[in-house]
């Protein structure tokens, strides 16, 4: 008898818990599934460090493969790509937009795979996470180097598809998105989309070449 | 990452919007969103930030950019490679410290003109400590033992703080990217840097070239990285320089 009552109570608690999770009334458990902005940068830093430490063993292709899923999870490439060609984005048809976005994403990942190509005792340090301002959270992370001054990265992140994603990085007050945009819009003006795609593909191929 | 007649720069100033800042628990100030456009937030930069500096001399500037770039990759880089083989990094950093110490009047006067009393005090203390305990400035004891960082102050920045616009964009041979305002600042700084006034002028130029070369042996990697990863190097250097200098003017 006692067993039957306990069993029913347990069933009831399970049912209520399931209902609360489904309806979002159990926010702690529901939120625990999604990493916050700092956790996102922590995962990125861990992956970059791994790529640096195993740079020779992995080679360029291995680093690209290692970094690709993490970078795609961490960065809002759709937003960054569209913003990086400014007003020209609206002039492209669907096919051109898709081609540009693929080329842009490849180039972005290749840049990381090409540049994080060795390890000399570096480590990352997370400094702080700001309160959201207009939906943007800034996570500050430092790259501590043995011989050189630390480099401070300001990751500007916003929630995209239930995940905090980077929309810009600022280093020494220089917005990397603005820097890219200045170049891409210049190329779009002088050479058009085909010229930009060719240049990005050449750059991407260049990262795959061993350094001289 | 790297690094401008004032009438033509008025439009630039109106474009500059101070982005809201976020104070972090660490005390560092973080950049935040700067522009709200309907439906989308573009963080970190204003629409105007991308191309708001006047560049009517683009043909000349591009030619100078190519000259500087070739000078670096064809002449300086091989020479730096040889220099680095002979002179250890510690010695090259000591030489950089020595010249940095001699440039104290630039930072001190800039701090004074900006009414930055604390920065003035730090510069004075740094100069005293480094000129004595730091063996004529070769060692940056003020930084390593007293945590006194050199203050990032210059005359171009000071002019910017007084509301003087950037003016035209220039690329000068040997010097690199600049604006009319920063060029004016550099000219004033010539008179605030004691060794630049050495007679004869040829000797001062020689010392200056050595300082330039020595610094390049330590810092040129940043230039190389920017240029090598850039899709359009001229636009990249120009934008990086303008963004950097605006940030220097904006910050305390």
Image: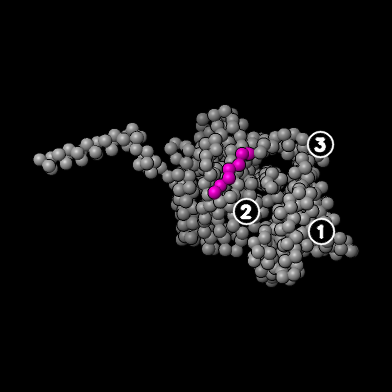
**Crowd tier of the residue under label 2, counting other residues whose Cα lies within 10 Å: few below 14, some 14–19, many 20 or above:** few
Q: Which residues are magenta?
A: B19-25
The circle drawn on residue B7 is: 3
User: Considering the numbered disc 1 on the image, is that residue within a helix, a strand or a loop?
Assistant: loop
Q: Position of residue A164 (x, y in %)?
A: 47, 41
User: Visible in this render: residue B94?
Assistant: no
Chain bearing mark 1: B
User: In front of the other: label 3 or label 1?
Assistant: 1
- Total marks shown come to 3
Q: Earlier in the sequence, mark 3 or mark 1?
A: 3
User: In front of the other: label 3 or label 2?
Assistant: 3
Q: Earlier in the sequence, mark 1 or mark 2?
A: 1
User: Visible in this render: residue B247?
Assistant: yes
Q: Position of residue A2 (x, y in %)?
A: 12, 42
Q: Earlier in the sequence, mark 3 or mark 2?
A: 3
Question: As rendered, which of B186 and A78 lies closer to the eye?
Answer: B186
Q: Which residue is mark 1?
A: B193
Query: Who's the residue at 83% across and 51% down the image?
Result: B187
């Amino acid at each position: 008898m006692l067993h039957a009552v306990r069993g029913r109570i347990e069933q009831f608690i399970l049912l209520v818990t399931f209902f609360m999770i489904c309806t979002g009334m159990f926010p702690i458990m529901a939120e625990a599934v999604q990493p916050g902005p700092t956790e996102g940068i922590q995962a990125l830093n861990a992956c970059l460090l791994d790529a640096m430490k195993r740079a020779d063993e992995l080679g360029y292709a291995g680093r690209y493969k290692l970094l690709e899923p993490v970078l795609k999870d961490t960065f809002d490439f759709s937003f960054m790509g569209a913003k990086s060609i400014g007003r020209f984005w609206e002039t492209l048809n669907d096919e051109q937009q898709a081609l540009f976005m693929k080329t842009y994403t490849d180039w972005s990942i290749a840049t990381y795979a090409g540049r994080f190509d060795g390890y000399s005792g570096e480590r990352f340090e997370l400094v702080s996470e700001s309160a959201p301002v207009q939906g943007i959270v800034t996570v500050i992370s430092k790259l501590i180097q043995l011989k050189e001054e630390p480099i401070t990265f300001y990751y500007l992140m916003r929630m995209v598809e239930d995940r905090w994603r980077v929309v810009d990085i600022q280093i020494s007050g220089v917005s990397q998105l603005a820097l890219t945009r200045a170049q891409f819009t210049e190329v779009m003006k002088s050479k058009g989309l085909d010229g930009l795609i060719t240049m990005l593909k050449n750059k991407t191929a260049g990262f795959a070449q061993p350094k001289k | 990452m790297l690094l401008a007649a004032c009438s033509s720069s008025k439009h630039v100033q109106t474009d500059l919007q101070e982005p809201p800042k976020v104070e972090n628990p660490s005390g560092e100030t973080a950049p935040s969103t700067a522009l709200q456009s309907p439906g989308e937030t573009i963080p970190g930069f204003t629409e105007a930030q991308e191309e708001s500096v006047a560049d009517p001399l683009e043909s000349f500037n591009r030619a100078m950019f190519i000259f500087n770039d070739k000078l670096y990759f064809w002449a300086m880089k091989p020479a730096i490679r040889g220099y680095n083989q002979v002179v250890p990094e510690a010695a090259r950093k000591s030489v950089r410290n020595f010249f940095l110490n001699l440039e104290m009047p630039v930072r001190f006067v800039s701090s004074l003109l900006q009414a930055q009393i604390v920065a003035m005090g730090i510069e004075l203390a740094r100069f005293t400590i480094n000129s004595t305990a730091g063996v004529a400035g070769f060692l940056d004891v003020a930084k390593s033992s007293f945590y006194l960082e050199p203050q990032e102050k210059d005359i171009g920045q000071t002019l910017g703080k007084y509301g003087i616009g950037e003016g035209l964009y220039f690329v000068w041979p040997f010097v690199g990217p600049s604006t009319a305002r920063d060029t004016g600042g550099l000219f004033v700084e010539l008179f605030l840097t004691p060794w630049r006034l050495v007679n004869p002028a040829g000797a001062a130029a020689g010392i200056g070239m050595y300082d330039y070369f020595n610094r390049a042996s330590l810092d040129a990697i940043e230039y190389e990285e920017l240029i090598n990863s850039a899709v359009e190097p001229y636009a990249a250097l120009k934008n990086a320089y303008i963004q950097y200098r605006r940030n220097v003017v904006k910050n305390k």
